[in-house]
Image (cartoon, coloured by chain):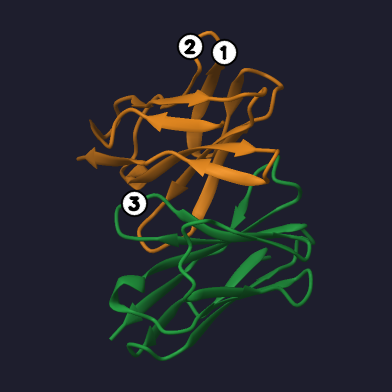
Amino acid sequence: DAMVIQNPRYQVTQFGKPVTLSCSQTLNHNVMYWYQQKSSQAPKLLFHYYDKDFNNEADTPDNFQSRRPNTSFCFLDIRSPGLGDAAMYLCATSRTGTGEAFFGQGTRLTVV
Amino acid sequence: AQSVTQLDSHVSVSEGTPVLLRCNYSSSYSPSLFWYVQHPNKGLQLLLKYTSAATLVKGINGFEAEFKKSETSFHLTKPSAHMSDAAEYFCVVSDPGTYKYIFGTGTRLKVLA
């Protein structure tokens, strides 16, 4: 029944060690988003894809990369995680950015 | 440009009393507006949405919101708060030109027994 699935729910990584978070969707939506959410803050958009068209936010650090190999899957790669990258990472989808966005349960990233 | 302003960062109510969470928007077009709820360590769940149909929108768990164009507001209400309503609430507007969703800063609702 789950429509936007994020794995894993909790991820612990070492300082500087590359980590990949994954997101899959069963909704066949065109648009997929990655958000970073720190404690007691609103989600902050990192980037989004419209189909294969990648859109990076101007203030997203170069340390963050993304891949969307097909409609269903999207990955967030953090090349060298720092302590400041510890956060909840949320994946979302929408059909065309006009109706509602559907969110996954998030991945809580801890950097040690 | 689209934006939303949530007027209260924290709201406390007693169980069984009404809830009012305030949101004002700014939009170049006829907006699509949403309220999402987030419980601790969870993703965001859609409560309700306004997409230019009825101005009074009913959502899940007894919540509703009224779109008032003259006041550029989209306040969220519930007649009687329940302990399980304690969570963070986000007012969101969509930008169809960029496919982005613009978030308010959030309102943390506390429900007192």
Secondary structure beneath dot 1 equals: loop
Q: Look at label 1 and name its amino acid.
A: Lys
> Where residue A41 is drawn, which disc sits there?
3
Mark 2 nearby-residue class (10 Å; few <14, some 14–19, many ≥20): few
Quadrant location, the C terminus of chain B: top left
Drawn colour of chain A?
green
Q: Quadrant of residue A68?
A: bottom right
The N terminus of chain B, quarter of image: top right
Disc 2 marks which residue?
B71
- Distance from disc 1 to disc 2, alpha carbons, whole Å, reads 5 Å
Q: What chain does mark 1 sit on?
A: B
Same subunit: marks 3 and 2: no
Residue A80, picture quadrant: bottom left
How far apart in space, not on screen, are marks 3 and 2 (Cα)? 26 Å
Kindly check if marks 3 and 2 are in contact, taking CB atoms under 8 A apart as contact.
no
Mark 1 vs mark 2: same chain?
yes
Q: Return the residue nearer the eye: B64 or B43.
A: B43
Q: Which residue is mark 1?
A: B69
Q: Does any portion of residue A33 appear in the rendered image? A: no
Give me the residue at 40% from left, 24% from top. B79
Q: Secondary structure at mark 2?
A: loop
Judge whether residue B83 can be spotted in this image: yes
Q: Secondary structure at mark 3?
A: loop
Question: Which residue is pictured at 44% across the width and 41% down the height?
Answer: B90
Q: Which amino acid type is marked by label 3?
A: Gln
Cβ–Cβ under 8 Å for marks 1 and 2: yes
Chain of the residue displaying label 2: B
Q: Which chain is orange?
A: B
Instruction: State the residue in front, A44 or B66.
Output: A44
